Image (cartoon, rainbow, N blue to C red):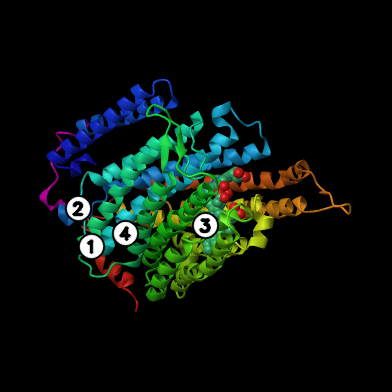
């Protein structure tokens, strides 16, 4: 880690950590009578620990002169390990939340009440797991497809550690009751500012690496990754514009109010799905799926058309989260229309992935890693079809407020986002650590079946409970009153909630198996020689060349 840095870079890293520690100290002093003070202390501690870590290897030998001829993979490696740690944590909390809905008493005081650990779950899996995996794979892919090393040495570490510090502030904050009550954007103003700095650094690293590329063409994965980084910066900044009550308090008021606030939030929330949970992971898919299958993308042109369709259409669809609200009717109709149009570029990508596998089905049969990616493409197609359908106003009148939405979310999250990530991680861990393969191919197989069965159980349970809920709430007696009370519908949910929690348990065990396998692979002996550039470049070029 430190051995890749020169003396000057080590000094810079220490200065940077010192600056972080001082910021934390100031926050701790200013907020001594507020939870923000605890976060200040946490930031200060993170800075000090970092100084000690660098100090420990400060006098280690400097890197050899040929370091610029190699890819810079250490930050990606650390981000992969962190992604696996977050997924273990996030899935366990998710299953706990699921059991709370079966048995509401499963809490240990306010810190672990449903309202607090639910965002702990969503933040850990989306930002902790998904975000780290995206940072790792984007660093990996952009260097290989550009045939250029990341130009900066300390900045990628700032991105990885700064980002994880943000996630840590977020989840510990929720447990203390800190939230700005915007879904997927719960952290308060100081954490948001940290994320802006981290994210802009990430964008600059990406652009600087691309600018150094030795490959004339910018491979499609990079387009998706760039859209992900750029748009997330935009969304995050706009949705979080707020005025803190004071610099010593973890409380702020949004610049927006009323229906404008709602629209800004769901423009954000919806496009977080589009650019965080979709575009970034499509970037992963377009690199790792063809690489693993050993075949070029079925239609490179279609991947580009899909890119422009997705980036343009998604932006206008956010209002489908606000059907039947105070939002003007035409804005709702606009969101619905764009959501329906979105199906075309979405299926173009899902279809492109599956058609790429045509002729390689024997590999899909034998290789669980590739099967993860294949199933991810299927669930991507399924959840986008479902999303377009749910965006129709009259369908939404049935699905909204019910578990159908939760089923849709997890078809996308478990089936698409997490599966494509596991597939990509299983593909790139041996490449990154220069191992012959994963520690155990059988464990990958076990993980695959646990993940698939867990997803199917989860999603079917929620489809059932969502439809039952929706229908019970709109059933009238002959005299025109509601046939069921809310409590009746709650009782009817019980078996589905048990099923969901069991499905989640299977999925979680799969995640644990995956984390164990990744750890054992890293710890494995027998490196496969030192392949400079570490990927057989010939294969890479042949597979990834635009087909048209
Ligand atoms: C072990 C697997 C998982 C279990 C048991 C689980 C369970 C849950 C539960 C119980 C909720 C709250 C539902 C409600 O309020 O009615 C929830 C919400 C959510 N989960 Fe998961 N989850 C799992 C995995 C994941 C993964 C891997 C992701 C993302 C990559 C994810 C993303 C979300 C999101 C975005 C929500 C909020 C949904 C909404 O507000 O509509 N979950 N999850
Ligand atoms: C064509 C693509 C898609 C469309 C048109 C779409 C549409 C929708 C609609 C209409 C809702 C319900 C809004 C409501 O009633 O409150 C929804 C919720 C949601 N969708 Fe999708 N969806 C798509 C793809 C995806 C994918 C691939 C994911 C990946 C995980 C995803 C994640 C979510 C999440 C997290 C929510 C819950 C938001 C909340 O907290 O309320 N969607 N989507
Ligand atoms: Fe949406």
Cα separation, mark 4 vs mark 1, equals 10 Å
Q: Which residue is mark 1?
A: 147
- For label 1, the SS is loop
The image shows residue 429 at horizontal and vertical percentages of 35, 52
**Residue 202 relative to residue 497: left or right:** left
Of tags 2 and 1, the one toward the viewer is 2
Of tags 1 and 3, the one toward the viewer is 3
Q: In the orientation shown, which residue stands out farthest toward the left?
A: 65
Q: Are marks 2 and 4 in contact (CB under 8 Å)?
A: no
Q: Which residue is mark 3?
A: 318
Magenta-drawn segment: 56-67
Cα separation, mark 1 vs mark 3, equals 37 Å
As displayed, is residue 106 above or below residue 80?
above
Of tags 3 and 4, the one toward the viewer is 3
Q: Which residue is mark 2?
A: 151
- The image quadrant where one finds the C terminus is bottom left
Q: Residues within 10 Å of mark 3 (few under 14, many from 20)?
A: many
Q: In the orientation shown, which residue stands out farthest toward the right?
A: 479
| Sequence-first disc among 1 and 3 | 1
Q: Which residue is mark 4?
A: 141
């Amino acid at each position: 880690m430190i051995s890749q840095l020169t003396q000057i870079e080590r000094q810079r890293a220490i200065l940077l950590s010192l600056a972080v520690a001082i910021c934390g100290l100031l926050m701790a002093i200013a907020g001594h009578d507020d939870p923000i003070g605890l976060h200040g202390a946490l930031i200060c501690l993170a800075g000090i620990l970092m100084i000690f870590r660098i100090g420990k290897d400060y006098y280690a030998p400097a890197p050899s002169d040929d370091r610029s001829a190699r890819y810079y993979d250490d930050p990606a490696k650390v981000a992969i390990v962190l992604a696996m740690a977050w997924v273990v944590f996030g899935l366990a909390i998710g299953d706990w939340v699921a059991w709370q809905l079966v048995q509401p008493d499963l809490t240990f005081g306010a810190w672990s009440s449903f309202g607090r650990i639910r965002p702990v779950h969503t933040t850990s899996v989306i930002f902790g797991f998904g975000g780290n995996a995206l940072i790792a794979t984007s660093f990996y892919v952009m260097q290989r497809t550009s045939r250029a090393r990341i130009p900066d040495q300390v900045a990628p570490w700032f991105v990885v550690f700064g980002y994880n510090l943000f996630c840590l502030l977020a989840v510990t904050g929720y447990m203390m009751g800190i939230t700005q009550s915007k879904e997927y954007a719960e952290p308060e103003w100081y954490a948001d500012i940290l994320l802006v700095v981290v994210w802009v650094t990430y964008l600059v690293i990406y652009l600087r690496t691309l600018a150094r590329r030795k490959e004339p063409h910018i491979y499609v994965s990079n387009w998706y990754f760039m859209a992900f980084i750029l748009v997330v910066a935009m969304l995050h900044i706009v949705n979080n514009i707020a005025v803190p009550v004071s610099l010593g308090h973890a409380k702020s008021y949004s610049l927006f109010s009323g229906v404008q606030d709602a629209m800004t939030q769901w423009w954000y929330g919806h496009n977080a799905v589009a650019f965080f949970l979709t575009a970034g992971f499509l970037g992963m898919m377009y690199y790792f799926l063809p690489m693993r299958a050993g075949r070029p993308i079925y239609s490179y042109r279609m991947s580009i058309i899909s890119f422009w369709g997705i980036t343009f259409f998604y932006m206008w669809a956010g209002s489908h989260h606000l059907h039947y609200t105070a939002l003007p009717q035409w804005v709702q109709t606009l969101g619905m229309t764009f959501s329906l149009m979105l199906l075309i570029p979405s299926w173009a990508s899902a279809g492109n992935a599956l058609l790429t596998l045509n002729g390689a089905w024997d590999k899909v049969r034998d290789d669980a890693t590739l099967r993860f990616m294949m199933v991810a493409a299927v669930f991507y197609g399924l959840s986008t079809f479902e999303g377009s359908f749910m965006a129709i106003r009259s369908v939404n009148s049935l699905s909204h407020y019910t578990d159908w939405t939760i089923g849709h979310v997890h078809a996308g999250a478990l089936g698409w986002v997490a599966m494509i990530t596991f597939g990509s991680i299983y593909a790139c861990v041996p490449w990154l650590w220069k191992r012959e393969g994963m520690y155990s191919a059988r464990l990958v197989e076990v993980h695959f079946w646990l993940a698939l069965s867990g997803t199917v159980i989860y999603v079917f349970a929620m489809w059932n409970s969502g439809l039952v809920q929706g229908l019970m709430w709109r059933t009238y007696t002959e005299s025109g009153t509601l046939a069921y009370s809310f409590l009746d519908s709650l009782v009817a949910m019980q078996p589905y909630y048990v099923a969901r929690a069991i499905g989640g348990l299977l999925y979680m065990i799969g995640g644990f198996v995956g984390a164990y396998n990744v750890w054992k692979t890293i710890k494995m002996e027998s490196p496969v020689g030192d392949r400079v550039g570490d990927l057989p470049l010939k294969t890479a070029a042949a597979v990834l060349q635009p087909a048209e």
